[in-house]
Image (cartoon, rainbow, N blue to C red):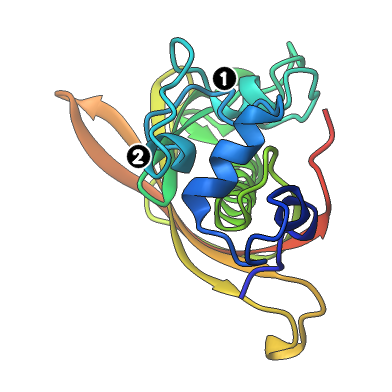
């Protein structure tokens, strides 16, 4: 389903084009590529190739796009939401707190701001899934093709929120009229305000399409 890593195959000097993922990650590491900058034990280089993380885990946003000024997840946007997402099994878990300046009504955060969190988190989930499957050192650029959001309860401001995602499937080119790969992702946003118990606030289904070779810094 995924494109072959042609340059990598040549680096093996006669090895099969479809080399095992373990060998690909080791090849990248041996040639100076930084392959797990978020230092996650769930990165395939750690899981498949046994390459231990180099330090303490950081968010994927801080690891791959530290200069990003994205409103939802850019580490370098002091006026943004600065979502921080960490790896889970074929997904991500993120932490965010929405300031009350984004309230639409007392106690009710603007729905567009809420959906921007889900959109950022979903794009990161899709990009990392494509990166992992193709054994790439950095995630490709993805953009939102569609997202369907279901608001269950009002989202509060100034309270810690948890957003989780799970990859549903990778959709290859030529399917349902797509000219580029896309990833279908399920998303959920929770509040932890009720005695420490999570409360589902929003769920969403997103389709995120690959657009370029690498995400911008």
10 Å neighbourhood of mark 2: few (<14), some, or many (≥20)?
A: many
* The N terminus: image quadrant: bottom right
Provide residue 102's location: percent of width, then percent of height.
64, 27
Where does label 1 land, which residue?
100
Q: Is residue 204 above or below residue 106?
A: below
Q: Is residue 127 above or below residue 197?
A: below
Query: Which of the numbered marks, if any, corresponds to residue 79?
Result: none
Q: Is residue 86 above or below residue 58?
A: below
Q: Is residue 162 above or below residue 157?
A: below
- Dot 2: what SS? strand
* The C terminus: image quadrant: top right
Count of marks placed on residues:
2
Provide residue 174's location: percent of width, then percent of height.
75, 87
The quarter of the displayed image where residue 93 is located: top left
Residue at left offset 61%, top offset 44%: 124
10 Å neighbourhood of mark 1: few (<14), some, or many (≥20)?
A: some
In the image: residue 16, left or right of residue 180: left
Where does label 2 land, which residue?
190
Nearest the eye: 109 or 129: 129
**Mark closer to the observer (1, 2):** 2
Nearest the eye: 193 or 82: 82
Provide residue 113's location: percent of width, then percent of height.
64, 38
**Mark 1 or 2 closer to N-term?**
1
Residue at left offset 70%, top offset 29%: 33
Q: Residue furthest front?
A: 14
- Dot 1: what SS? helix
Nearest the eye: 56 or 72: 56
Provide residue 65's location: percent of width, then percent of height.
73, 26
**CB under 8 Å between callouts 1 and 2?**
no
* Residue 114 in sight in this render: no
The quarter of the displayed image where residue 186 is located: bottom left
C-alpha distance separating marks 1 and 2: 17 Å
């Amino acid at each position: 389903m995924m494109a072959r890593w042609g340059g990598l195959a040549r680096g093996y000097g006669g090895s099969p084009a479809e080399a095992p993922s373990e060998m690909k990650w080791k090849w990248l590491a041996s040639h100076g590529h930084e392959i797990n900058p978020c230092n996650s034990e769930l990165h395939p280089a750690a899981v498949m190739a046994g390459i231990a993380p180099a330090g303490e885990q950081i968010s994927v946003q801080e690891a791959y796009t530290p200069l990003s000024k994205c409103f939802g997840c850019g580490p370098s946007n002091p006026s943004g939401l600065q979502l921080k997402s960490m790896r889970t099994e074929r997904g991500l878990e993120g932490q965010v707190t929405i300031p009350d300046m984004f309230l639409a009504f007392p106690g009710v955060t603007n729905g567009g701001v809420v959906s921007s969190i889900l959109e950022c988190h979903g794009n990161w989930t899709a990009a990392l899934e494509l990166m992992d499957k193709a054994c790439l050192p950095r995630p490709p650029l993805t953009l939102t093709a569609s997202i369907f959001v279901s608001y269950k309860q009002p989202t509060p401001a100034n309270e810690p929120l948890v957003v989780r995602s799970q990859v549903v499937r990778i959709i290859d080119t030529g399917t349902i009229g797509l000219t580029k790969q896309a990833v279908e992702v399920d998303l959920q946003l929770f509040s932890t305000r009720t005695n420490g118990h999570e409360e589902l606030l929003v769920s969403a289904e997103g389709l995120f399409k690959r657009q370029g070779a690498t995400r911008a810094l």
